[in-house]
Image (cartoon, grey):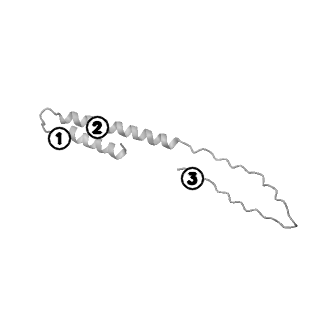
Amino acid sequence: MGIGGSIFLIALGAIFAFAVEAEVGWLDLSVVGWVLMLAGVAGLIVTLYFWNSRRRTVAPVREERVVADRTVPVQDDRVVQEYREVRRPGPPV
């Protein structure tokens, strides 16, 4: 639901529960207001719980291994150079 939606439900429920004095036949607006406020508080608690659990996760530690270079044979007194491009994985999403 999100923090904004939860605060909206709490505010709307408070308006129905405390500020509106209207008769709508079989519907009691005071009870509707309390129900909306409770739903907003429950949504706020669930949202904050999920936000805190998302922040606690730690990215895995990446280990870099050094591999011994292969020996390059020399042919006819020429020096052969080896070009190696190493690409590291991008940041975690």
Which image quadrant for residue 88?
A: bottom right
Which residue occupies the extreme right position in the image? 77
Which residue is disc 1 drawn over? 20
Give the number of the disc on residue 31. Answer: none
**Which residue is at 28% across, 37% downward?**
37
Q: Residues within 10 Å of mark 1 (few under 14, many from 20)?
A: few
Distance between the alpha carbons at the discs numbered 3 and 2: 41 Å
Say which residue label 3 marks.
91
Residue at left 79%, top 55%? 70
Alpha carbon of mark 1 to alpha carbon of mark 3: how far? Answer: 53 Å
The type of residue carrying mark 1 is Val
Asked whether the residues under the numbered discs 3 and 2 touch, taking CB atoms below 8 Å apart as contact, a structural biologist would say no
Q: Position of residue 83 (x, y in %)?
A: 73, 62
> Which residue is at a point 13% across and 39% down the rendered structure image?
22
At 82% from the left and 56% from the top, the residue drawn is 71
* Label 2 crowd (10 A; few <14 / some 14-19 / many >=20): many
The disc placed on residue 37 is 2
In the foreground, 34 or 84? 84
Q: Earlier in the sequence, mark 2 or mark 1?
A: 1
Mark 1 residue element = loop
Is the residue 48 above or below the residue 81 in the image? above
Q: Earlier in the sequence, mark 1 or mark 3?
A: 1
Looking at the rendering, in which quadrant would you find the N terminus? Answer: top left
Q: Position of residue 12 (x, y in %)?
A: 25, 43
Circle 3: element type: loop
Amino acid at circle 2:
Met
Residue 75 placed where, x, y %?
Answer: 85, 64
Compared with 21, 77 (above or below) is below
Residue sitting nearer the eye, 7 or 63: 63
First-in-chain label (3 vs 2): 2
Between the C-alphas of marks 2 and 1, the distance is: 15 Å
Left of 17 or right of it: where is 58? right
